[in-house]
Image (cartoon, helix red, strand yellow):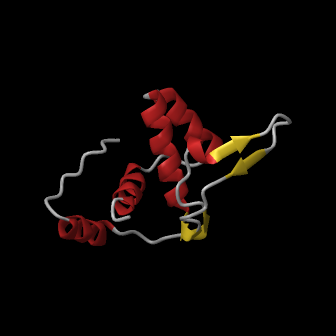
Amino acid sequence: MDSTLPFSSPKDLYQNLLATQFPESPVFSHGDMNDANIIVDSQGGIGLIDWGRGGCADIWCDIAHAARNIWEETKEKTLMQRFFENLKIDENEQKIKYHLLLDELF
């Protein structure tokens, strides 16, 4: 998950996103799913904060952000595999890359 952008301009990034677009499965999304936005209380209750990007988005939006966070924090392929196993889905690098590039427009 390389965070450097191979585009010379926002227009080039936009053109790439148009060319690699895929059919979406809209869900209610947090929009910025990462460990900094998850809180756990002393009884094990879990909550989410920072809903500034919350709304309707493709299901891969939150998955991409969470996967990036796991990778940046750990660099552990086994944790990435476990993440997708627990979600009961296959990792889709194209959809992850698409959503992380889309996030660059914000």
State the residue in front, 79 or 103: 103
Image quadrant where residue 28 sits: bottom right
Q: How many numbered marks are there?
A: 0
Report the residue that reaches farthest toward the right: 43
Residue at position x 68%, y 52% from top?
48
Q: Position of residue 19 (x, y in %)?
A: 26, 70
Q: Position of residue 76 (x, y in %)?
A: 46, 27
State the residue in front, 56 or 105: 105
Q: Is residue 31 left or right of residue 22?
A: right
Image quadrant where residue 50 sits: bottom right
Residue at position x 39%, y 55% from top?
100
Image quadrant where residue 84 sits: top right
Residue at position x 54%, y 60% from top?
31
Q: Is residue 91 left or right of residue 37?
A: left
**Quarter the C terminus occupies:** bottom left
Q: Position of residue 88 (x, y in %)?
A: 62, 46
Q: Position of residue 82 (x, y in %)?
A: 58, 34
**Quarter the N terminus occupies:** top left
Residue at position x 49%, y 50% from top?
65
Q: Is residue 5 above or below residue 24?
A: above
Q: Is residue 25 left or right of residue 1?
A: right
Q: Is residue 73 above or below residue 66?
A: above
Report the residue that reaches farthest toward the left: 8
State the residue in front, 47 or 19: 47
